[in-house]
């Protein structure tokens, strides 16, 4: 299911813009402590992230139609992972994607797209 983003724009009110997030990816490291016992890890994570976003303006004035753009930027977050057994863990994690801004000129003004995406995840892992 695509996610909707809020777009900052200097174009007239009769001109609307929308964005759909198609995918998210990241490369991150994590560091943590075990304040609740050796089986539970409280951690911080950070690194670099990417997302593919489809931007659309309506009406498509002057030939400005849908565009598909890949954005990149910093990702940071944290979580809690618990070892339920020697093979199974489960975790709860928050990630914030703070991505680079792009300015797209149109015949009736510029559109600034500055994606900031917040995710919450619950995961179950099996370790071989």
Image: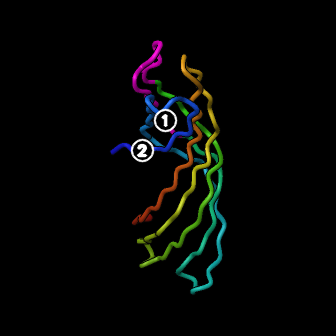
Q: SS of the residue at dot 1?
A: strand
- The label shown at residue 78 is none
Residue 128 in sight in this render = no
The picture places residue 81, in percent across and down from the top left corner, at 51, 72
Q: Quadrant of residue 110?
A: top right
* Residue sitting nearer the eye, 126 or 1: 1
Foreground pick, 86 / 110:
110
Find residue 4 and name its label.
2
Residue 80 visible in the picture: yes
Residue bounds of the magenta highlight: 51-66
Element carrying mark 2: strand
Locate residue 21, reporting x and y percent.
44, 40
Q: CA distance from mark 1 to mark 2?
A: 12 Å
Residue 12 as seen in the image, left or right of residue 28 = left
Percent position (x, y) of residue 55?
A: 46, 31
Quadrant location of the N terminus in the rendered image:
top left
Q: Which residue is mark 1?
A: 52
Instruction: Assign the C terminus to one quadrant of the image.
Output: bottom left
The image quadrant of residue 4 is: top left
Which residue appears at 56% of the width and 35% of the height?
9
- Give how far across and how far down residue 32 sits, in percent: 65, 71
Q: In the rendered structure, are the residues bearing label 1 and label 2 in contact, judged by CB atoms less than 8 Å apart?
A: no
Crowding near pointer 2: few (<14 within 10 Å), some, many (20+)?
few
Residue 107 drawn above or below residue 77: above
């Amino acid at each position: 299911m695509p996610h909707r983003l809020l777009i900052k724009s200097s174009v007239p009110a009769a001109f609307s813009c929308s964005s759909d997030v198609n995918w998210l990816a990241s490369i991150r490291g994590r560091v943590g402590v075990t304040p609740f016992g050796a089986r539970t890890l409280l951690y911080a994570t950070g690194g670099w992230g990417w997302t593919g976003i489809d931007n659309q303006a309506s009406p498509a004035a002057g030939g400005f139609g849908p565009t598909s753009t890949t954005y990149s930027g910093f990702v940071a977050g944290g979580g809690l992972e618990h070892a339920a057994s020697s093979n199974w863990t489960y975790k709860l994690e928050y990630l914030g994607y703070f991505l680079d801004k792009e300015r797209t000129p149109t015949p009736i003004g510029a559109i600034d797209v500055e994606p900031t995406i917040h995710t919450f995840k619950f995961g179950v892992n099996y370790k071989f």
